[in-house]
Amino acid sequence: MTRHLTAGDTAPDFTLSDAEGRSVSLADYSGTRVIVYFYPKAATPGCTTEACDFRDNLGSLQSAGYQVLGISPDDQDAIRDFAAAESLPFPLLSDPGNATAKAFGAFGEKTLQGRTVEGTLRSTFAIDGEGTLTYAEYDVDPEGHVGRLRSALEG
């Protein structure tokens, strides 16, 4: 089991490929506040609900000074298709070996259709411009998530 991170921890750095195969690093966002969210699988109901919630609230998040990055174990083709199908205007990144999810504590056992499996845990993190976590949430309910996140970040 990976350790859960909490506010005040240093965010693990990463470099992952986006839907077009470009390398994206957390370090690219130095000096900028970032929301990093982990989702289990592109184009599934919960992940679509969550991604569209971020899409629909992106303007208010950006107005508050945040950029958004979504990370899943999906390959480049899957994240490209998902982003296109849902008109997602923020980068989706591929973490095929789950190394980044594990570093954030967003990988472990979960129950799926009555079975215990290992996989990406739906989790969200806010990171300040210096790379410090200001917010960490695990076991995210995708329905209305961004509204709750915005309230927490404003509080």
Image (cartoon, rainbow, N blue to C red):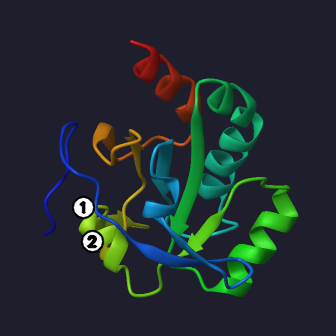
In the picture of the structure, the residue carrying the numbered disc 2 is: 102
| Residue 80 sits above or below residue 84 on the image | below
Q: Residue 129 sits in which quadrant? A: top left
Q: Position of residue 82 (x, y in %)?
A: 76, 69
Mark 2–mark 1 CB contact (< 8 Å): yes
Foreground pick, 73 / 58: 58
In the picture of the structure, the residue carrying the numbered disc 1 is: 105
Q: Position of residue 57 (x, y in %)?
A: 71, 32
Foreground pick, 138 / 113: 138
Neighbour tally class for label 2: few under 14, some 14-19, many 20 plus, Cα within 10 Å: some
Quadrant including the C terminus: top left
Under tag 1, what secondary structure?
loop
Q: Amino acid at mark 1?
A: Gly
Report whether residue 115 is seen: no
Q: Position of residue 27 (x, y in %)?
A: 43, 62
Residue occupying image coordinates x 18% and y 46%: 9
**Does residue 18 appear to the left or right of 35 in the view shown?**
right
Q: Amino acid at mark 2?
A: Lys
Q: Residue 125 sits in which quadrant? A: top left
Residue occupying image coordinates x 24% and y 61%: 105
